[in-house]
């Protein structure tokens, strides 16, 4: 570009090429002159092509918006959908007329005007602090807003919120339940959470916002009729009518979403999963979040100082081994030391230079001490910053506990995830990792009870495949990994070593997750040939498992999705990909999703049932966390034996209730901290 700007055209540039500097560029131009001319010719639009041009025919017309919107909805282009203006003006569309309820008489009139049994849209306007600013309620054509200085006249509204014959339609029900709890208001079921419903309908989608759902289901753009805010009449005119109007509109939309979303769930075969599992689970999750987990902040403070001393010692060792100090946290400086100063052979190159990631350093550790020291330093440094120093900062000053957020609409498999902080990812290996777990404690007079489903995914694999050998192993109460090792190595149990059992365990879980011979060889440290032999032997001995996997992949390709034992769908478009890598990824998902998703369904049902029983029989016991296959409880010491029996019995009975053809086994552990209690 610079040369063409200077010389005007490519031809002129090539004619005066002797004037070009530097010499390297001049040489390139001389050598590539023909390519430059060819590129110009290829980029030139041919104006003499025999095209019949009719201006009217080619005149740009607006799109057929309704058809285009339907197509974009079908293809899942939610971001593009948001860019469309609604095909109506606010004046043409029924606007939300909102009555602000200021006294008990107006609240009573609103309630009496509601049709019996109609779904009630509810939008809670949560204020920046811990409280609630107001509530918007709507039966579709009748909408009211209640400012939350309303305890004096909330009685008629409370009766509606407690009405067990009327469905409450809410977007993100858990947040509303938590907000209501803070102000002492109870919201009774039945519930319809449009965020969770959209998650079941579109599990691969990350955006489950009400704005997206309303536009996709109703063609309604939230805020389309919003008027520009008038200037305040005075500096003291602080009424936020915009938020009130937005809440009222959202409540109205929620009421209208109830029927189409229910119909879509029924059509998809997910309505029972939604009403019997996902909706009853929401109050359980809200309760777990409120309960929180007690943290030994003082203990973590001591651990932080200990880690600081260890990290200082490791830094001194690194400086000695490297022959001088350098910035350990700088990949560039580390690469210079490793590959230039010490002369180690680089393994992988990235855009910015030679890789110094953990995998690379682990491989280099066989050649020199420094990479191993760096791996150790990074590991301890991450433990310190991510857990030891960060967790005490997240303790709620009022409750003195950690309150995670359990997310119901993130993982496409149906698993719950944990954020702010992620308590499902607390380290379980290494001395320092275990000491971090020691900081999760029970209060005085209580103990922690951990109830862990034993080998839940292999059991579901046995149920889904109906493999006679697998079914027999679990029916006899045998160890699946020992049984697998005996089959793979063709040895009696007396000759199976711990390493053989570990290999068998890795094979079983590898099979569940669709592992390749290469992946298995990396995990257990054997050749690909041996890894391939182990996998083939497993499929030979447990042939129905191979048939199940082939069936899952074929059904996934035919239907476009897989299902769990409770009918949870997981779309897998990757199965149709022309890219072999993407298609292979899709096949692994088709194998794993029905198993992992069924395990997620099962523990959700167990959480609901156990929580209900505890409320009735052991009300002082709290469920305080779920970590995939494990439930954690805070139990008064005097109730421990009864709670252990209740939890174990109910969790194991869940399999029978869902029709599993293998018995479930729950391992229990107790103790005053999580390290001791983990079974």
Image (tube, rainbow, N blue to C red):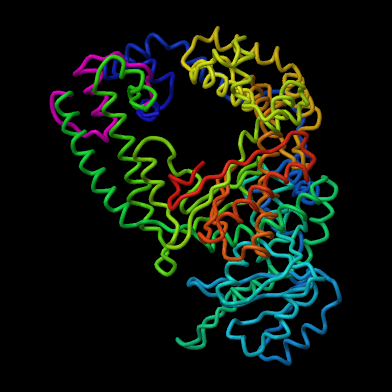
Q: Nearer the viewer, residue 415 or 504?
A: 504
| Residue 200 covered by magenta stretch | no
Q: Position of residue 248 (x, y in %)?
A: 68, 73
- Residue 46 at least partly seen: no
Q: Quarter of the image holding residue 513?
A: top right
Q: Is residue 34 above or below residue 131?
A: above
Q: Position of residue 90 (x, y in %)?
A: 73, 69
Q: Position of residue 614 (x, y in %)?
A: 64, 60
Q: Position of residue 630 (x, y in %)?
A: 57, 45
Q: Is residue 191 above or below residue 180?
A: above
| Residue occupying image coordinates x 69% and y 33% | 595
Q: Nearer the viewer, residue 334 or 53?
A: 334
Q: How many marks?
A: 0
Q: For the N terminus, give its image quadrant.
A: top left
Q: Quarter of the image holding residue 563?
A: top right
| Magenta stretch in the rendered image | 322-351
Which residue lies most toward the top here?
A: 529
Is residue 377 left or right of 514 when viewed as pictured?
left
Q: Is residue 94 above or below residue 622?
A: below
Is residue 233 left or right of 157 when viewed as pictured?
left
| Residue occupying image coordinates x 49% and y 12% | 526
- Residue 28 at least partly seen: yes
| Residue occupying image coordinates x 66% and y 54% | 610
| Residue 331 covered by magenta stretch | yes
């Amino acid at each position: 570009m610079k040369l063409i700007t200077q010389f005007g055209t490519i031809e002129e540039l090539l004619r005066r090429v002797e004037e070009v500097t530097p010499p390297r560029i001049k040489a390139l131009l001389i050598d590539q002159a023909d390519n430059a001319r060819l590129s110009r010719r290829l980029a030139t639009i041919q104006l003499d092509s025999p095209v019949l041009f009719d201006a009217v025919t080619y005149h740009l017309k607006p799109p057929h918006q309704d058809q285009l919107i339907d197509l974009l909805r079908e293809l899942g282009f939610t971001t593009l959908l948001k860019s469309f203006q609604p095909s109506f003006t606010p004046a043409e569309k029924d606007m939300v007329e909102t009555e602000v309820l200021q006294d008990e008489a107006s609240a009573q009139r609103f309630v009496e005007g509601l049709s019996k049994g109609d779904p009630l849209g509810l939008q809670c306007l949560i204020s920046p602090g811990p409280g609630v600013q107001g509530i918007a309620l709507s039966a579709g054509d009748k909408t009211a807003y209640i400012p939350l200085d309303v305890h004096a006249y909330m009685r008629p509204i409370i009766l509606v919120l407690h009405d067990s014959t009327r469905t409450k339609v809410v977007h993100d029900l858990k947040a509303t339940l938590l907000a209501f709890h803070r102000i002492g208001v109870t919201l009774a079921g039945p519930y319809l959470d449009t965020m969770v419903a959209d998650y079941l309908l579109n599990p691969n989608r990350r955006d489950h916002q009400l704005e997206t759902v309303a536009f996709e289901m109703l063609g309604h753009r939230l805020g389309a009729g919003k008027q520009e805010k008038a200037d305040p009449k005075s500096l003291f005119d602080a009424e936020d009518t915009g938020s009130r109007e937005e809440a009222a509109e959202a409540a109205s939309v929620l009421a209208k979403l109830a029927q189409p979303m229910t119909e879509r769930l029924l059509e998809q075969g997910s309505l029972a999963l939604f009403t019997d599992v996902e909706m009853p689970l929401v109050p359980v999750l809200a309760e777990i979040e409120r309960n929180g987990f007690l943290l030994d902040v003082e203990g973590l403070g001591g651990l932080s100082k200990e880690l600081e001393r260890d990290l200082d010692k490791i830094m001194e060792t690194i400086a000695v081994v490297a022959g001088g100090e350098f910035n350990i946290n700088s990949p560039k400086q580390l690469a210079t030391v490793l590959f230039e100063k010490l002369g180690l052979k680089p393994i992988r190159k990235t855009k910015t230079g030679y890789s110094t990631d953990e995998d690379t350093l682990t491989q280099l550790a066989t050649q020199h001490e420094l990479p191993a020291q760096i791996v150790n330093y990074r590991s301890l440094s991450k433990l310190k910053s991510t857990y030891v120093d960060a967790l005490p900062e997240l303790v709620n000053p009022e409750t003195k506990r950690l309150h995670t957020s359990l997310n119901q609409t993130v993982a496409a498999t149906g698993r719950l995830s944990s954020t702010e902080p992620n308590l499902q990812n607390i380290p379980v290996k290494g001395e320092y990792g275990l000491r971090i777990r020691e900081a999760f404690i029970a209060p005085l007079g209580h103990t922690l009870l951990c109830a862990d489903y034993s080998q839940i995914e292999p059991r579901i694999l046995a149920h889904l495949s109906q493999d006679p050998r697998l079914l027999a192993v679990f029916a006899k109460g045998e160890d699946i990994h020992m049984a697998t090792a005996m089959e793979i190595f063709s040895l009696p149990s007396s000759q199976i070593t711990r390493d053989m059992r570990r290999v068998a365990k890795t094979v079983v879980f590898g099979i569940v997750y669709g592992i390749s011979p290469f992946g298995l060889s990396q995990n257990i440290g054997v050749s690909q040939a041996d890894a391939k032999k182990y996998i083939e032997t497993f499929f030979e001995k447990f042939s129905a498992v191979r048939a199940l996997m082939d069936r899952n992949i074929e059904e996934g390709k035919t239907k476009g999705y897989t299902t769990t034992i409770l009918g949870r769908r997981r779309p897998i478009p990757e199965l149709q990909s022309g890219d072999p890598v993407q298609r292979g990824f899709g096949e692994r998902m088709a194998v794993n999703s029905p198993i992992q998703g069924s395990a997620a369904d099962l523990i959700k049902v167990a959480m609901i049932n156990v929580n209900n029983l505890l409320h009735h029989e052991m009300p002082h016991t709290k469920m305080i966390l779920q970590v995939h296959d494990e439930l954690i409880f805070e139990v008064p010491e005097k109730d421990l034996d009864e709670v252990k029996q209740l939890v174990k019995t109910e969790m194991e009975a869940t399999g029978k209730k869902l029709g599993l053809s293998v018995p479930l086994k729950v391992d229990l552990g107790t103790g005053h901290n999580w390290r001791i209690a983990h079974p």
